[in-house]
Image (tube, grey):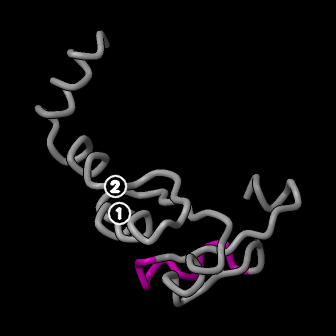
Amino acid sequence: MQMAQEGHQVMLYIKEKSSRHLFEGLVWKTEDWEAAAQEADFTVFDVNGDGERAEKLRSKGLKVWGGGRLADKLENDRMFGMEVMKRGGL
């Protein structure tokens, strides 16, 4: 929403069918996220669990913000995440 308010063209894909009504009338939405990503300046992944998708786009040379296998592992494996934070001094 912030990016749209700043004048950027924003397109949203909502994976969960039960949530696709969200943001209705506020931003453009797509049902074909892969085609939209091919045309975008960059793609933002706002959720974990789609790391493979984010990595696939990166491997094609597309610009991707967020997401990835490491992000998924950090989120889903709390012991791993805690160890990484400990090593980083957090």
What span is colored magenta in the figure? 15-24
The answer to which quarter of the image holds residue 58 is bottom left
Q: Secondary structure at mark 2?
A: loop
Camera-nearest residue between 15 and 36 = 36
Q: Where residue 20 sits in the image (x, y, percent)?
A: 53, 81
Image position, residue 9 (x, y; %): 79, 69
| Circle 1 residue | 55
The residue sitting at 26% across, 44% down in the picture is: 75
Is tag 2's residue or tag 1's residue first in the polypeptide sequence? 1
Q: Describe residue 56's horizontal placement relative to residue 40 as left or right.
A: left
Residue bearing the label numbered 2: 68
Q: Secondary structure at mark 1?
A: helix
Q: CA distance from mark 2 to mark 1?
A: 6 Å
- Viewed as shown, does residue 45 lie left or right of 90? right
Q: Is residue 20 magenta?
A: yes
Tell me what residue is drawn at x 36 percent, y 70 percent: 56
Circle 1 residues within 10 Å: few <14, some 14–19, many ≥20: some
Image quarter (top left, top right, bottom left or bottom right) of the N terminus: bottom right
**Left/right of residue 22 with respect to residue 58 in the rendered view:** right
From this viewpoint, which residue is outermost toward the right? 7
Name the spot of residue 57 as percent of width and height, x first: 43, 70
Is residue 88 shown in magenta? no
> Which three-letter amino acid code belongs to the residue tagged 2?
Gly
What residue lies at 20% left-to-right and 47% top-to-bottom?
Answer: 73
Q: Residue flagged by tag 1: what amino acid is it? A: Glu
